[in-house]
Amino acid sequence: MIKFYKIYFFLFIFFSFTFSVFASNVDGTITPSPKYAFGENLGWINFGCDNCNVHITDTGITGYAWSKSHGWINLSPSGSGVTNNCSGILGGKAWSKSLGWVDFSGVTIDTLGKFTGMAGTPGTKAGRINFNCDSCGVTTEWQQCLLRESPAQVLINSITNSTIPQISANITITNEGNIDTEYQYEWCVVSDISNDCGGGDDVYYSSGAKLIAHGDTWTTTKDATVPISGTYYFKLVAHYGVHFSTSTKLFNAVSSGGGGAVSSVIDIFKFNVADFSRDYKVNSIDFSILLYFWKAPSPFKNLYVDINKDNKVDSVDFSILLYEWDK
């Protein structure tokens, strides 16, 4: 008996998995319920019967619909057939052996996968087919192309310039999906790997958008301003739908030996960037000053506490202070 249940369970899983393979947002079937439209001459039409085998792709619809009173309606007859495009706009003709051609040019598949509109031509034997009546409802898993997610592969190939204040990175974003996609992307420099881009604690943050054709790769260089030398993380994030891909590269930002912006400030004023009290030391006094301005609104009475000049005093400024401690 145990062996029987194991076999039954295996077959259940197998057939469930096998069925799911044939339904997707690029090759949709008709969902089990609802599945009917109403023809003024054809009566109730079932698009999801056991032997209908309807499939919706980006170019057309194949299979059959069943009219109880007039039999099979061929959705992909020789010489014609119902067409589709990436926007869900249908066209072409189906064929009823008893009532002739049915024009589908008045039907669309909306953003939820629901068939809407009227097929057919007034005055013909087949008449009109209504997909919008109160008891009508034909839906599919197929999705309009623009609604699909195109996964992105993101890479930070190298840090091409690590001399402060301008850091440069060579990056690549690849469209691994089936449709052209405009990716919203962002890049940042953070001092802690756990910090996310745009989280408010970036040393540097910026964003952009890029249309990338499916299968294509875009490689470019992105710059970031880092005010002081140290160890940082360059991050790149590309968003697609509700998901995203990210890449991170560790690097050391170095001083140019007097040519960098931070070094120039120190040379002119003889003060460390974290020396808020201007006593030529970075110590507990400066820590107390920075703590006083923690999360305070800009502008600040002490002009020096916003070290990275992002109009806020936060963990980034404290990180720089600790780095400069006792210098």
Image (tube, helix red, strand yellow):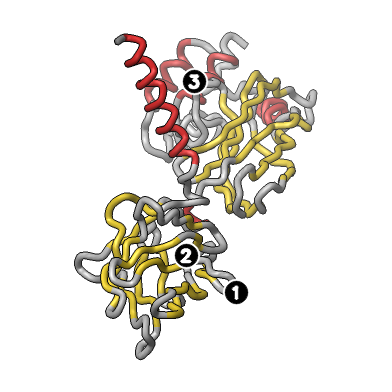
Nearer to us of marks 3 and 2 is: 2
Residue 292, image x, y percentages: 37, 23
SS for tag 2? Answer: loop
Looking at the rendered structure, the kind of residue marked 3 is Phe
Residue visible at 29% across and 79% down?
A: 41
Which kind of residue does numbered mark 1 sit on?
Gly
**Residue highlighted by disc 3:** 318
Query: Which residue lies at the image location 27% right of the left edge and 73% below the top edge?
Result: 43
Secondary structure of residue under mark 1:
loop
Q: Is residue 25 above or below residue 247?
A: below
Viewer-proximal residue among 10 and 293:
10
Name the foreground residue: 52 vs 59.
Answer: 52
Q: Position of residue 9 (x, y in %)?
A: 36, 21
| Marks 3/2: CA–CA distance | 54 Å
Q: Determine which of the numbered discs, if any, sits on residue 79 in the image.
A: 1
Is 43 in front, or is 235?
Answer: 43
- The tag earlier along the polypeptide, 3 or 2, is 2
Q: Which mark is residue 88?
A: 2
Quadrant of image for the N terminus:
top left
The quarter of the picture where the C terminus appears is: top right
107 sits to left or right of 230: left
Residue 190 seen: yes
Q: Could you tell me the amino acid type at mark 2?
A: Gly
Side of 182 relative to 102 (left or right): right
Viewer-closest of 110 and 235: 110
- As drawn, the residue found furthest toward the bottom would be 123
Distance between mark 1 and mark 2 Cα atoms: 21 Å
Q: Earlier in the sequence, mark 1 or mark 2?
A: 1
Q: Label 3: few (<14), some or many (≥20) within 10 Å?
A: some
Disc nearest the viewer among 1 and 3: 1
Query: How many numbered badges does the structure rendering display?
Result: 3
